[in-house]
């Protein structure tokens, strides 16, 4: 709905209306919320669409979607049951003096479209309450129906209609955690039959069917990915003689065309979701893990950046992007390449020897590119936690994802291709990251002062942060302080116009290299192809709704991240419930607004809510005892029993 409202705010062409949107368009037209002229539907000047931001005492502001105008004030009595975050239509008070104001005339979407309810026993009777709040859900059920359910039975609820739409299972079953986190955002794993039919209709690549594509099958491309990866987005080849880097990316746009069931599903998902035990792909596995995936020893369609480097300046002297057919000759995992860099892996044959030889030379170049990049951009040390689960979805162990030389090599190759892609258009989908605000920096500086880091304001923010990182390194707190710095940053997002990427230090940046798992990259491929073919009609179509699309995929990205984080929180909570009363090592991670710690024991990364009131400082090592666990809310409550580093017997 938000995407539709953004497009109506900006002007929606009749030909761009999706079948499932026509009823809403007709409804809005009948109510005169929108106008229709020259085949364009547009929100009437009397109305604004947006989300509610409550101030206090039933007064609020409307955060208008799709345009950079001032927010509209909504006075007490004009909210009409709208709540924080709800999507609404507001009628403006025209001719009224003072700040722009209006009244809510229709709630078209709730802040949280779907929620989870579960059965609890209250006063001897079953009751259906919200998973997050424990408040009644608003679903009207007879006591007879309620009593037919078991305690902890879980249900997916449509908040717009206050109706149960699916029974998910029971809270006592660890396998239900996946269903909970997906249902909250209305995500699903299965693809509809019409989508699968399209995905299964494509045949294996026969180069004779692609006479206009460059034949690069003779080049010794290779892929380097995690050992568990199945969707190989990118392959590389370094041509030392011509100082040219080839970055070949799966040509998803050849298969996923605009319109139709397959594209609609890709837009709806926008991202693949990665859980510890499996992935939920953006595209059907027939494409994501097979035909689009740049598998070894198979002809595959690719969209290739050919990037010539000046090895005196390490600048790009020329680049071009074109459609090709490649034949990856080796699938490596990161561990293999790291072992090779440490002289622990030898080539098995002449072909592999050639590939490893150019990777060794390419590493020197990417190391230099990284060194140059970090003069403007930032190098933050943040370690991701990886989980191992058993067959019943219980937590077995955790480990830190390590950034190694093989990761860095691939990262800088991809960054180079993404930068080159961003140079080729002035409007499209950019990946932007604005500098932190002064208010966020002030909070950061105050937190740093609390742990003894003196912030000296330098001529540039880069110099100031580098000085902070140097002090943190001397204190042995590099990762902890980098986490604070990251938290002070603005969130990276997608936007139709470029405003630079602060974190990377790039003037222009986009996402080009992962179209199997990100819809943004697929759009960039389509746009670059239109530009290469000088197809202004196709280019204009791609850009017509780019503002709404940029906002929509940014929101989908946040949803995917929230799902991944909450799933892990639920696994930590179930583990903690089995360890109530035991003691573990932890480190204070937050002192305001709430006192929290993170587990640093054999199991690492769990967020802990401290219920005792010890005089502790940020990043102090402590010993905690698990006191209680709230499984529905995935919260762990602990008390501090010792301060300082000590061995713990759990």
Image (cartoon, rainbow, N blue to C red):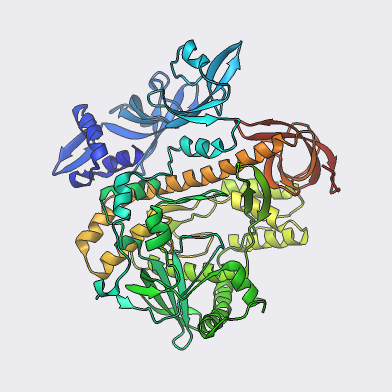
User: In the picture, residue 638 is in which quadrant?
Assistant: top right
Residue 80 appears in view: yes
Q: Residue furthest front?
A: 391
User: In the picture, residue 124 is in which quadrant?
Assistant: top right
In this view, 126 is above or below 431: above
Q: Quadrant of the C terminus?
A: top right
| Total marks in image | 0
Q: Residue furthest left?
A: 38
User: In the picture, residue 244 is in which quadrant?
Assistant: bottom left
Q: Position of residue 336 (x, y in %)?
A: 60, 71
Residue 12 or residue 458, whichever sits in front: 12
Residue 24 or residue 340, whichever sits in front: 340
Look at 26% across and 38% down and name the residue there: 20
Q: Position of residue 251 (x, y in %)?
A: 35, 65
On screen, residue 380 versus residue 351, left or right, reads right
On screen, residue 221 versus residue 429, left or right, reads right
Q: Position of residue 269 (x, y in %)?
A: 40, 47
Look at 27% across and 44% down and name the residue there: 10
Look at 66% across and 41% down and name the residue there: 572
Residue 592 appears in view: no
Residue 506 or residue 546, whichever sits in front: 546
On screen, residue 349 versus residue 66, left or right, reads right
Q: Residue furthest bottom?
A: 241
Q: Position of residue 430 (x, y in %)?
A: 40, 58
Q: Quadrant of the N terminus?
A: top left
On screen, residue 625 versus residue 528, left or right, reads right
In this view, 218 is above or below 565: below
In this view, 32 is above or below 491: above
């Amino acid at each position: 709905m938000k995407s539709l409202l953004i497009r109506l705010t900006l002007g929606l062409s009749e030909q761009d209306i999706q079948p499932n949107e026509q009823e809403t368009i007709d409804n809005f037209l009948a109510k005169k919320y929108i106008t229709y002229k020259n085949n364009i539907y547009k929100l009437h000047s009397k109305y604004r669409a947006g989300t509610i931001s409550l101030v206090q005492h039933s007064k609020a502001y409307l955060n208008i979607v799709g345009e950079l105008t001032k927010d509209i004030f909504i006075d007490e009595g004009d909210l009409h049951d709208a709540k924080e975050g709800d999507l609404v239509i507001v009628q403006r008070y025209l001719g009224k003096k003072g700040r722009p104001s209006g009244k809510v005339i229709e709630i078209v979407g709730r802040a949280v479209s779907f929620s989870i309810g579960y059965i609890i026993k209250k006063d001897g009777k079953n009751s259906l309450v919200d998973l997050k709040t424990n408040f009644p859900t608003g679903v009207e059920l007879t006591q007879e129906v309620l009593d037919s359910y078991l305690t902890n039975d879980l249900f997916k609820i449509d908040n717009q209609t206050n109706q149960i739409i699916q029974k998910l299972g029971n809270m006592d079953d660890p396998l239900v955690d996946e269903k909970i986190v997906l249902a909250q955002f209305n995500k699903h794993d299965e693809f509809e039959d019409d989508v699968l039919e399209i995905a299964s209709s494509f045949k294996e690549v026969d180069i004779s069917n692609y006479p206009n594509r460059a034949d690069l099958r003779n080049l010794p491309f290779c892929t380097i990915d995690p050992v568990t990866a199945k969707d190989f987005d990118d392959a590389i080849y370094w041509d030392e003689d011509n100082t040219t880097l080839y970055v070949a990316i799966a040509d998803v746009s050849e298969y996923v065309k605009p319109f139709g069931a397959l594209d609609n599903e890709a837009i709806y998902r926008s991202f693949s979701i990665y859980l510890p035990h499996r992935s939920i792909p953006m595209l059907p596995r027939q494409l994501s893990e097979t035909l689009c995936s740049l598998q070894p020893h198979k002809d595959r369609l690719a969209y290739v950046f050919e990037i010539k480097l000046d090895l005196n300046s390490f600048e790009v002297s020329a680049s071009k992007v074109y459609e090709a057919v490649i034949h990856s000759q080796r699938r490596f995992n990161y561990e293999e390449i790291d072992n090779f860099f440490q002289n622990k892996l030898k080539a098995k044959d002449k072909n592999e020897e050639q590939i490893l030889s150019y990777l060794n030379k390419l590493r020197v170049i990417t190391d230099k590119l990284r060194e140059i990049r970090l003069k403007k951009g930032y190098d933050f040390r943040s370690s991701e936690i990886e989980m191992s689960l058993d067959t019943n979805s219980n937590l077995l162990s955790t480990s830190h994802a390590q950034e190694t030389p093989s990761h860095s090599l691939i990262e800088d190759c991809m960054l180079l291709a993404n930068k080159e892609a961003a140079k080729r258009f002035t409007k499209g989908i950019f990946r932007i990251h604005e500098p932190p605000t002064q208010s966020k920096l002030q909070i950061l500086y105050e937190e740093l002062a609390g742990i003894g880091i003196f912030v000296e304001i330098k001529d540039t923010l880069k110099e100031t942060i580098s000085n902070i990182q140097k002090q943190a390194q001397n204190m042995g707190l590099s990762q902890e302080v980098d986490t604070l710095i990251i938290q002070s940053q603005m969130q990276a997002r997608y936007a139709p116009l470029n405003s630079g990427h602060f974190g990377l230090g790039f003037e222009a940046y986009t996402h080009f290299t992962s179209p199997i798992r990100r819809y943004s990259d697929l759009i960039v491929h389509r746009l670059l192809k239109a530009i290469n073919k000088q197809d202004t009609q196709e280019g204009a179509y791609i850009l017509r709704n780019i503002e709404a699309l940029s906002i929509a995929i940014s929101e989908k990205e946040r949803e995917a991240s929230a799902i991944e984080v909450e799933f892990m929180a639920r696994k930590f909570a179930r583990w903690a419930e089995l360890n109530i009363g035991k003691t573990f090592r932890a480190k204070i991670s937050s002192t305001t607004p709430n006192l929290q710690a993170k587990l640093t024991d054999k199991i690492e990364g769990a967020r802990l809510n401290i219920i005792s009131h010890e005089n502790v400082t940020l990043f102090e090592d402590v010993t905690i005892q698990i006191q209680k666990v709230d499984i529905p809310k995935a919260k762990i409550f602990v008390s501090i029993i010792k301060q300082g580093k000590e061995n713990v017997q759990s």
